[in-house]
Amino acid sequence: MKIDILVPEFEPVPGAVIAWRAEVDAATWRLSAHQVWEHGGRLIALWAADTGRSPSVHLALVFAGRLLWLSLPVKGPEPEYPDLSDLFPAAARMQRAVFDLVGIRARGDLVDKRRWLRHGAWPVSEFPLRRGFDAGRRFDPVADDYAFVRVAGDGVHEIAVGPVHAGAIEPGHFRFSVVGERVLRLEERLGYAHKGIEKRFETLGVHDGYRLAGRVSGDSTVAYAWAYSMAAEAAAGLTPPPRALWLRALWLERERIANHLGDLGHIGNDAGLGFALAQFSRLKEDWLRSNQYAFGHRYLMDRVLPGGAAVDLADDAMMRMRDDIVRVRGEIARLRVIFDEHPGLQDRLVGTGRVTRELGERLGMTGLAARASGMPLDLRSSFPCAPYDALQPRMVVHEGGDVAARTALRFDEVIESLQCCGRILDGMPEGNIATLYPTPEEGAVGIGWVEGWRGDILIALETGSNGALRRVHPHDPSWRNWPVLEHAIIGNIVPDFPLINKSFNLSYSGQDL
Amino acid sequence: MYRILRQIARTGIVSETPPRPDEAYRLLSARLRAEVLRSFAGALSIRHVDAGSCNGCELEIHATSNPVYNLEGLGIRFVASPRHADMLLVTGPVSRNMETALRRTYDATPAPRLVVAIGDCGCTGGIFGESYASAGRVSKVIPVDVAVPGCPPTPVQIIQGILTAIEVRAAS
Ligand code: SF4
């Protein structure tokens, strides 16, 4: 099928989210991306695989209301493909990761050839996601000298922080160029948490990969396990029973609320209001205990699996779920008034770390941060799969683009998700919570795409023989938002960085893989 | 201000009784216990190091500081530099990209120092195991006193692990 102005013939990849797939040559790869870019489409993910006769690069785009999946087989001892980072800046790091892992180089005048995920753990001649690579191999560490971009000028100096940080957060390195206290430039260096997740998937079966998927970024375990299961179900041509889908939505919204509660406390704390952390962390604790009580895990790990759901909702747990909604709604309303009326707090939040809509669109920002900059992106509304087609949550959008907007958005989304939880409890269909997951055919593919609390999580999967996994690429929204953070800090003062960083709260593990 | 005070009054005290140490978590016996007690003088400073976790363990480490578990109330606090720390709380399988940073942090922590490995990953490498990118469990890279399993371990288990590491048995 033709899609709009695009050249390739697309085939549907069936599933809860339909992806339109086409195999292309290098020229069509570049032309299609250019056309999508020209007409306001977006890049979701770029990755590579070495599964077929030759390695291939893959691209997920959104265009004309559809999810497109382009695949470009590449050949030769030093395979290449056309660079897309001039169109979609977020592609730059993905392309660097593609080279580090699969050894396929983007070709273009402006290509950043520095490594990204590799650091010193394996040499430049080795590519862990190549087919013959033995995952158990251990290399002597190579020197890890990394060429940061230097900013020259009168009075400019550098501040380097990380990879180990002052707070209990994930590892990453930030290099600030500052004059006085003002930040002229921030350069991030990530990849410290790279632990070989994609290679690990290759040792698992399709039916049990959900556990690893749920640990790509632990704070989004429900979203990842759902995206994985969606992809696995697509590959097997299976639709889970309705009750399983409604349970998944309940968990996804509960995960969103838990993370938003945590973030609201930390944002308040980083802006000098310790009271906020005490209050919100107490609310979050109660919320997690309800998860434990009702579903047997505080973060709901391993509750979503291919074929359905692992636990059901008992009657007494239903009561507790309803009580939670009423209680948190009341507490949130009171705390919101305190936030809004606190001049010292507002002074720290308003205008800090601002990202305009224009900048966000150019950089390809997504998820929660995008909605706080006026970009109406939320899969639950724009690509609703069951049960969101029935739930119809209201998309929350704010215009400010600053820490204040990302804070207000979280307040609003908590309320909206609480309402959504109420509708789920009211409408929960009866019936089984799982169907037996069959062994999918060799070479089957599937896509899963789920709006986690941070943004949209995409998982592309291909099966091997006898129910093995041949290739899984989990894609965190943080890939697209980390580069935005580098811009959000410009012109702000260094002491505001923790606050701005927290207002995005991006995943390191999710992008380091 | 009035609203804040009213909210604090409404919330009341939610802290629960802290858990007891659990000897099952101990790996190294009686390591420098006497010195540890002397140097800590009733207050313990912890430096957290994420050596490659999925960030799930971090969520529960944060939770230990919430008003319900109130870790600070036990005289235990998180500090920003290893030089101020008595204990390292290490999560994750150690990614090879973090091996050097973890060793350096350990070396920068003044002796006697305690190391508590958190989570299935910290204990065994967990679901990520060992590979070209993961060195596996924390004790493959630095000496570990106490290892707390769980994916992630609960705040109570984490606090038990910390207390186990500093506890001196009355008998010894
Ligand atoms: S133990 Fe579990 S929660 Fe902790 S880092 Fe490992 S996978 Fe994540």
Image (cartoon, rainbow, N blue to C red):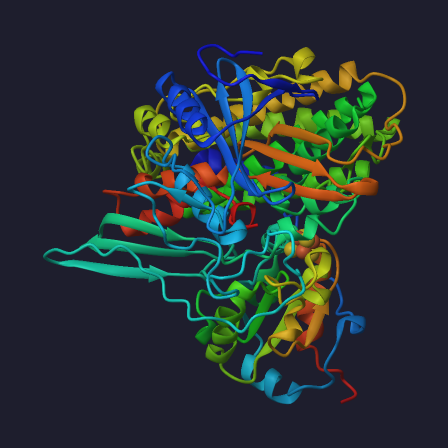
Count numbered badges in the picture: 0
Give the percent coordinates (x, y) of residue A167: 48, 57
Residue A298 appears in the rendering: no
Give the percent coordinates (x, y) of residue A239: 79, 22
Ligand 1 quadrant in view: bottom right
Q: Residue at x 76, y 71 (%)?
A: B25
Residue B33, located in which quarter of the rendered image? bottom right
Residue A51 appears in the rendering: yes
Q: Residue at x 53, y 40 (%)?
A: A47
As displayed, is residue B87 above or below residue B3?
Answer: below
Give the percent coordinates (x, y) of residue B164: 71, 73
Q: Is residue A199 left or right of residue B1?
A: right
**B28 or A334, which is in the foreground?**
B28
As displayed, is residue B80 above or below residue A494?
Answer: below
| Residue lying at the far front of the rendered structure | A76
Give the percent coordinates (x, y) of residue A333: 54, 25
As displayed, is residue A411 above or below residue A160?
Answer: above
Q: Is residue A208 left or right of residue A19?
A: right
**A25 or A115, which is in the foreground?**
A25
As displayed, is residue A155 above or below residue A479?
Answer: below
Q: Is residue A34 left or right of residue B125?
A: left
**A402 or B10, which is in the foreground?**
A402
Q: Residue at x 68, y 75 (%)?
A: B165
Q: Is residue B172 left or right of residue B100?
A: right
| Residue lying at the far left of the rendered structure | A154
Screen quadrant of the N terminus of chain A? top right
**A443 or A351, which is in the foreground?**
A443
